[in-house]
Amino acid sequence: MNHRILITAGLLVAFAVGYFLNRVVTKNPGNAPVESAQSVNSDQLKLGAFSMSLSVKDLNASREFYEKLGFTAFGGSKEQNYLIMKNGNALIGLFQGMFEGNILTFNPGWDENASNVAEFNDIREIQKRLKGSGLILMSEADENSTGPASLMLTDPDGNMILLDQHR
């Protein structure tokens, strides 16, 4: 039962972060059209922007700590119980009371500024390749869909990994 709660909380967090980042992306000047997803024919998967989603006990204390390391708030708010902190191309999500443990997060189709990248592997292509290599997924994207979707898996040590495509 705890495992299901963790998965559900992780997906909720992913969608909350996706909602925020989607708002950032759609505020582009001149309402420029968003590029469509493009598959990349390469042996190496392009997983997109990387961030750590950290479960924190005290959001203010964690914010202050990471600010001393040079991070600044990039998104979220205390009222929403999460902050996205940025230092150069490093991203850390601070989430209070949303899930247990920490999650490695990848966003296919985006760079570290939540800007679209021209070439990336669609989440469904990534999923097919992961399953083809024998990995077991905790949650999957609908293979018959297009656009935003996510999947989750764990590494051999039980670390959660979320691939969350927002476009």
Image (cartoon, rainbow, N blue to C red):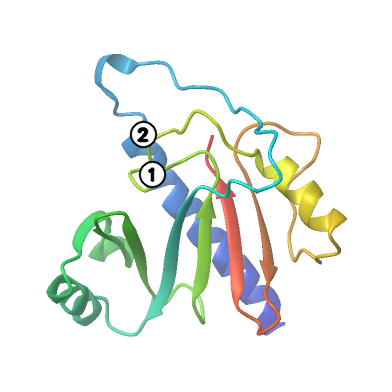
- Residue 115 on image: x %, y %: 38, 36
Q: Which residue occupies 43% across, 33% down?
A: 116
Q: Secondary structure at mark 2?
A: helix
In the visual, does 127 lie left or right of 33? right
Q: Which residue occupies 68% across, 73% down?
A: 154
Q: In the image, what residue type sits under mark 2?
A: Val
> Which image quarter is the C terminus in?
top right
- Residue 23 on image: x %, y %: 35, 37
Say which residue label 2 marks: 25
Occupied quadrant, residue 71: bottom left
Q: Where 120 sits versus 36, above or below?
A: below
Q: Which residue occupies 29% across, 29% down?
A: 27
> Which image quarter is the N terminus in?
bottom right
Badge 2 density bin: few <14, some 14–19, many ≥20, Cα 10 Å: some
Q: Where 1 sits versus 103, above or below?
A: below
Say which residue label 1 marks: 21
Badge 1 density bin: few <14, some 14–19, many ≥20, Cα 10 Å: many
Most distant residue in the front direction? 43
Occupied quadrant, residue 10: bottom right
Q: Front-most of 82 and 87?
A: 87
Q: Where 109 sits versus 130, above or below?
A: above
Q: In the image, what residue type sits under mark 1?
A: Leu
In the visual, does 93 lie left or right of 99? left
In the visual, does 117 lie left or right of 68? right
- Residue 135 on image: x %, y %: 80, 65
Q: How many marks?
A: 2
Q: Is there CB contact under 8 Å for labels 1 and 2? A: yes
Q: Secondary structure at mark 1?
A: helix
Question: How far apart, in angstroms, are the residues tagged by discs 1 and 2?
Answer: 6 Å
- Residue 75 on image: x %, y %: 27, 53
In the visual, does 159 lie left or right of 51? right
